[in-house]
Image: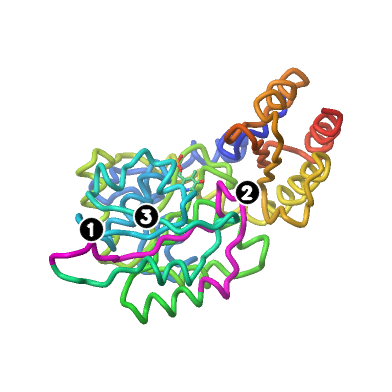
Amino acid sequence: MIDLRSDTVTRPTDSMREAMVRAEVGDDVYGEDPTVRALEERVAAMFGKEAALFTPTGSLANVLAVRTVVEPGQEVLCESAAHIARAELGAHGAVSGLTMRTWHHPRGQIDLPQIETLFAPDLGPYFVQTKAIAVENTHNFAGGAVLPLADLQALRAYADRVGVAIHLDGARVWNAHVATGVGLEEYGAIADVLAVCLSKGLGAPIGSLVVGSAEAIAASRVRRKRMGGGMRQTGILAAAGLHALDHHVERLADDHVHARLLAEACGVDPAGVDTNIAVVVRDDAPAFVAAAREQGVLVSAVGPKAVRIVTHLDISKTDAAAAAAILARL
Ligand SMILES: *Cc1c(COP(=O)(O)O)cnc(C)c1O
């Protein structure tokens, strides 16, 4: 089977497993795991921030990150297909007690006029107050779309003007960085707080981080433990993350080439494929997915009319070419 359902399906490479076996560990709830500390310090520095916190999932990293800038009873604005709005099972409401309103953009982009219309200042006991704007780069459900740096910078200027924070869901910010050449610290500079994943394109088995100020990370450490996310000898997992940062960032460019090849095979303009995700719109999405499976290619239906194809570390050039030939026939 050639598995193109998600970039989460990767298995740790042999050298990643070796790094995990060798990892120096300690009790991280006591702050004594040197490998976790090294990962947190390294990732914080990459984004030009003071501190970072290792979490088991990107969803938990998002929940903790947004909670550092929005109090219960306040709101965050985001795009309508954002992962925080659609795919975290209401955690931000259920756990953090905050609300969301959304703008809509077919490519998941920032739309400043819509955001300006949504923004609600503090009106005392009358309306919910907007405290943060969340953006997703790359945007998962918009087919791995990159948010241009100029738009992020314009949003930063607007947020500063009205006094709200920016959260960046950077589960795939690595892909944006490799696709555009924009530095990770430039993405860090437009956000107050970020969430980044090691378990997507980077190929680690587990792991995400919240990245932000020392104060935000200290508060997140308390809330992570409160939710049962205080972990012990997690250096085994952090070692996989460090290995991924050493070996699996620049190679994301290959995934992007493979995604464009697959898009073209399915009759999609490859110019619209920014990174490692291609979305094919067809009326028979579920039937197409089933037919592809019959031929040994796994893709996913995201809704009745869209098929999602995702490339990753475990898809070689040969796999991509073989899958492209099969999908083109279908
Ligand atoms: C995958 C993903 C997350 C986090 O997902 P987990 O499965 O909880 O690790 C967050 N944001 C985006 C955009 C994602 O694609």
Q: CA distance from mark 1 to mark 2?
A: 33 Å
The residue carrying pointer 2 sits among few (fewer than 14), some (14 to 19) or many (20 or more) residues within 10 Å by Cα, namely many
Specify the segment rendered in magenta. Answer: 125-152
Q: Is residue 301 left or right of residue 326?
A: left
244 relative position to 115: left or right: right
Rendered-image quadrant of the C terminus: top right
Badge 1 crowding class, 10 Å Cα cut-off, few under 14, some 14 to 19, many 20 or more, is some
- Residue situated furthest left in the rendering: 125
**Residue at (71%, 53%) from the top-left corner?**
273
In percent of width and height, residue 5 lies at: 63, 33
The residue beneath circle 3 is 37
Res 237 quadrant in image? top left
In the picture, measured across the screen, residue 236 lies left or right of residue 218, that is: right
Between label 1 and label 3, give the one nearer the viewer: 1
How far is mark 1 from mark 3, CA to CA? 17 Å
Query: Mark 1 = which residue?
Result: 219
Q: Is residue 164 magenta?
A: no
Q: Which residue is mark 2?
A: 143
Q: Which residue is at a point 37% across and 65% down the rendered structure image?
A: 118
Q: Few, some or many C-alpha atoms within 10 Å of disc 3 (few <14, some 14-19, many ≥20)?
A: some
**Chief secondary structure of the magenta span?**
loop
Residue 301 place in picture, x, y as percent: 62, 32
Circle 3 or circle 2, nearest the eye = 2
Does residue 123 sit above or below 232 in this rendering?
Answer: below
- x and y percent of residue 163 in the render? 31, 76
- Residue most extreme to the top: 294
SS for dot 2: loop
Query: Mark 3 to mark 2: distance in Å?
Result: 33 Å
Disc marking residue 176 = none
* Spot occupied by residue 223 in the image (x, y as percentages of width and height): 22, 49
Q: Secondary structure at mark 3?
A: helix
